[in-house]
Amino acid sequence: MDLNLLKLRLIAERRKITRSRRKAALARDEAASGLTDDFDRTPLLRENLDRAITATASHPGAEGEIAVFSTFCGITRNFTFDKNNRARDCPHYFVSNNRTALDIVQSLGWLPIFLDMEISKNPILSAHQAKVAKALPHLFPDLARHRFLVYSDDKQRIKHAELPGFIETLTDKGGAMAVKLSPHIQDNILWEFTDSLFQDRYRKQAHRMLRFLLKQMEAGKTLEADRLFMTGFSIRDMAHPRATALSEQWYADILDCGIDCQLAFDFLAQGNPDIVDLPAPPRKKYLGKKLPPGSK
């Protein structure tokens, strides 16, 4: 055999072995993490959620016009709560299917609410479970009795001093919900889609997100958008006549779109005066990568 042809054959064989090893390593990692989009969604359907949520308040003595809430679902080693988030000024509620997580936040002054859903090591299923409280707080008797509900992602620190001003902005503009603008992306929803694909759990749902995106466009929505949001922080005015309907539609869209609830929300917000934008926080990342301090 010609020496150069032998070299080509050896190169091809080496590529094949490398691909096989990489594929096997990826399969092992996914098996260990439980990461899959193939799971039973029946308990997450809107008509089945009453089975997971207690019909009576867990903390009937908690009062006030304003309340803060957050949520986490999943195994304990994935718990990401910021230990500096001690409850202050108003009732703080935490919704979870993990009783260890609830014990931890309760020690920091939060009021625990148990979500009766099975704990899974699958991060995608766990993220879907967490969308129940995030998108549908009115289903929880403890949360529903407060007029202003402040949602904050459990990973981020709450800046309590900002809350009165944000609530004033929401009421002055007559909105049902106020959400911070994204500091990372703007102008086109495809940036949200692209940015999400840098994370494994979103990449597993890429085709689901794409089908949702195309469906929204067929319904008359556009990729161009004057507002893109980060839904890790929001405020609802539960007295607004559209607050519940807005939340219900968002959850329905999340079931269709997948766990990138910002993608669903960006379409929901198009031309919707019930959604008020709040100033974007400092820009810290771009396309899945953290930016060095001082970057613009």
Image: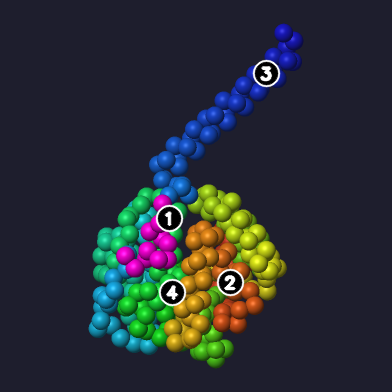
Q: Write the start and end of the magenta stretch as one range.
A: 40-51
Instruction: Of the two numbered discs 4 and 1 on the same chain, state the one appearing first in sequence.
Output: 1
Is disc 1 placed on a helix, strand or loop? Answer: loop
Instruction: Of the two numbered discs 3 and 2 on the same chain, state the one appearing first in sequence.
Output: 3
Is disc 4 placed on a helix, strand or loop? Answer: strand
Residue 188, image x, y percentages: 68, 65
Crowd band around label 4 with a 10 angstrom C-alpha radius: few (<14), some (14–19), many (20+): many
Which residue bears the numbered disc 3?
A: 9
> Does 43 appear in magenta?
yes
Q: Is residue 222 above or below residue 43?
A: below
> Does 220 appear in magenta?
no
Crowd band around label 2 with a 10 angstrom C-alpha radius: few (<14), some (14–19), many (20+): some
| Amino acid type assigned to the residue bearing label 4 in the image | Tyr
Evaluate whether residue 108 shows in this view.
Answer: no
In the rendered structure, find residue 151 and report the number of the disc placed on it: 4
In the rendered structure, find residue 268 and report the number of the disc placed on it: 2
The residue lying at 41 percent from left, 45 percent from top is 33
Which residue bears the numbered disc 1?
A: 41
The residue lying at 41 percent from left, 52 percent from top is 40
**Quick check: marks 1 and 2 in contact, CB under 8 Å?**
no
| Amino acid type assigned to the residue bearing label 2 in the image | Leu
Instruction: Of the two numbered discs 3 and 4 on the same chain, state the one appearing first in sequence.
Output: 3
C-alpha separation, residue under disc 1 versus residue under disc 2: 22 Å
Query: Closer to us: mark 4 or mark 1?
Result: 1
Q: Is residue 204 left or right of residue 11?
A: left
Residue 67, image x, y percentages: 37, 81
Query: What coloring was used for the rendering?
Result: rainbow
**Quick check: marks 4 and 2 in contact, CB under 8 Å?**
no
Instruction: Of the two numbered discs 1 and 2 on the same chain, state the one appearing first in sequence.
Output: 1
| Amino acid type assigned to the residue bearing label 1 in the image | Arg
